[in-house]
Amino acid sequence: MSQASYEQAGVNTVKEEAALAGLLRWVGKTLAFGAHRSALDFGYFASVIDLGTGTGLALSADGVGTKLLVAQMLDKYDTIGIDCVAMNVNDVLCIGAEPLCMLDYIAVQEADPAFLEQIGRGLYEGARQANISIPGGEIAQVRELIKGRRPRRGFDLAGACVGLVPMDRIIIGQDIRPGDVVIGLRSSGIHSNGLTLARQVFFAQARYRADRYLPELGRTLGEELLEPTRIYVREVLDLLRAGVAIRAMAHITSDGFLNLARVQAKVGYVLDSLPEPQPVFRLIQKLGKIRDPEMFNVFNMGIGFCLVLPVADADRALAMLKERGVEAYPLGHAVADPDRNVHLVAKKLVGQGSGFRRRR
């Protein structure tokens, strides 16, 4: 079996970044339009529009990606809406905003009532967990456009989330200091990124079926891959409301721990205490013969969300998270570094930009 990679599976992140430049050149020009101005540059987890009243309107948009194809393999759609909510609200949370509501967009081959009701159940549960409403959305029947893995079940699901944040309380890592602690909140598993590579390994290379029971996972492969993305809104907002001095937050999705480097402060990170990832990641790596740099570029590796905060607040934050049933770990600390490197000490990896490499 040959070594698997994200690029071979169909996702070229380097080409994507280059292609994005042309799109952003035109979209960026729109920031001059309208009465209200954007308070943040492109590239952070969410955007903020200054409403001119001391309040910022936080905005994000995201979808579920090819996890939808796994749902089609199992013909099970009642949790995929949780992922849609999670991918949006977790991003809005990263700037210190409270998510308020979300709109969904569903494109389908066929508007089957039972199928759409299952999607609705997941959206409801995600909204309940995040304490938001879904006051509207759109359904489009585009049979010629959408294809899938199961007849009449091809679909796409995306959302756009709105939140509020006081303009003087926007958190983008501007106050991070060397020595600040990085706390990692456990993921529920693979979440909603890296599924293209995971599917390549499991279904194309290893030729597993989605309903295959795997002792390493304690359940079927499809059940593992469909485990909903963890929503971190309630517990993190509790920390903020209690006065815990969170200086940065990062949603660990594509690019993994490199998402920590998006912050405004010129810092890097030394992560010297990473917990063991869930068995699904070890299985992907083993079957796909994937090297550590690729694994940490693509997957969350067991940590779905990170907080950066002063040493003095770390124990209090960990205690509060434990009270709320959240597994959380001190992962390492911030260091002064204008190049914004992220060091994974145990793996002997260093990351910069959008990739990890072996440390020399």
Image (cartoon, grey):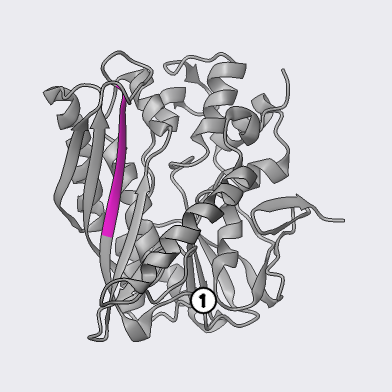
Q: Is residue 344 left or right of residue 329?
A: right
Q: Is residue 237 left or right of residue 271?
A: left
Residue 156: within the magenta? yes
Depth check, front residue: 309 or 175: 175
Q: Main secondary structure of the magenta part?
A: strand
Q: Residues within 10 Å of mark 1 (few under 14, many from 20)?
A: many
Asked if one can make out residue 209 in the rendered structure from this viewpoint, the answer is yes
Asked if one can make out residue 78 in the rendered structure from this viewpoint, the answer is no
Q: Indicate the quadrant where residue 329 lies.
A: bottom right
Q: Position of residue 82 (x, y in %)?
A: 29, 43
Q: What's the residue at 68%, 69% (across, down)?
A: 340
Q: Is residue 6 left or right of residue 222?
A: right
Give the extent of the magenta segment.
Answer: 154-161
Residue 35: within the magenta? no
Q: Indicate the quadrant where residue 334 lies.
A: bottom right
Q: What's the residue at 43%, 76% (across, down)?
A: 171
> Split into 4 quadrants, where in the image is the C terminus?
bottom right
Q: Position of residue 273 (x, y in %)?
A: 66, 60
- For this orientation, the residue located farthest to the right is 360
Depth check, front residue: 234 or 61: 61
> Split into 4 quadrants, where in the image is the N terminus?
top right
According to the picture, the residue beneath numbered tag 1 turns out to be: 173
Amino acid on which disc 1 is placed: Gly
Depth check, front residue: 204 or 137: 137
Q: What's the residue at 62%, 44% (across, down)?
A: 15
Q: Secondary structure at mark 1?
A: loop
Q: What's the residue at 28%, 53% (across, down)?
A: 160
